[in-house]
Image (cartoon, rainbow, N blue to C red):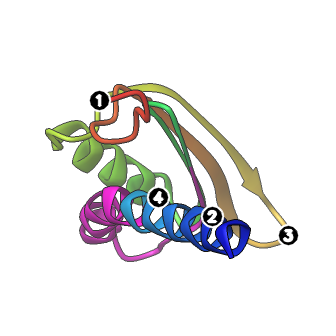
Amino acid sequence: YNQHQAGLEAQERLVRAAEQEKARHAFLLEEIETMIPVGLWLYRLEMEKDQLHLRGRAKSPAAISSLVQELNRSDRIGDIKSLESRWERDQGQIQFVISCTGVEGLDQSR
């Protein structure tokens, strides 16, 4: 019985930790959602420590520039560390990666 109870408590701790992680990132995802301009699609977000990497495609450089400006205005998102982009001629789109550091709420040591 004690072993079974200990197993249930361990599962419960894992579930609570997962819920806390989800809540911590939800506010950031909601903010990013409001920043996405027409003609730009995000297909991957990577969050680790205090870093955020956004990967996506855009119809124009102006759409990427608009997203970068919105990211810069955010109090929760730190500095943009890098922006890489490449034109995909066959798809008529620009593939990009934006990396930000100092993102509030992502550092798991806090």
| Residue 65, label in figure | none
**Residue at the location (46% across, 58% down)?**
17
Label 1 vs 3, first from the N-terminus: 1
Q: How far apart are marks 2 and 1 (CA)?
A: 41 Å
Badge number at residue 17: 4
The answer to which of marks 2 and 1 sits earlier in the sequence is 2
| Residue under label 3 | 90
Q: Is residue 66 magenta?
A: no
To which residue does mark 2 refer?
Answer: 6
The local secondary structure at tag 4 comes to: helix
Residues shaded magenta: 22-46
Which percent across, then down, holds residue 43? 62, 68
Residue lying at 51% horizontally and 70% vertically, measured from the top left: 12
Marks 1, 3: nearer the viewer: 1
Find residue 47 and report its horizontal and vertical position in percent.
53, 46
Q: Is residue 38 above or below residue 82?
A: below
The reply to whether discs 4 and 2 touch (Cβ–Cβ < 8 Å) is no
Q: In which quarter of the image is the N terminus?
A: bottom right
Question: What amino acid is found at the position of numbered circle 3 in the picture?
Answer: Asp
Give how far across and how far down residue 64 sits, in percent. Answer: 44, 52
Residue at the extreme front of the image, as rendered: 1
Q: Quadrant of the C terminus?
A: top left
**Residue named by callout 1:** 78
- Give the distance between the C-alpha atoms of the residues marked 3 and 2, in whole angstroms: 56 Å
Report, in whole angstroms, how far the alpha carbon at label 1 lies from the one at label 3.
34 Å
**Callout 1 amino acid:** Gly
| Mark 4 Cα shell of 10 Å, populated few (<14), some (14-19), many (≥20) | few
- Residue 31, by quadrant, is bottom left
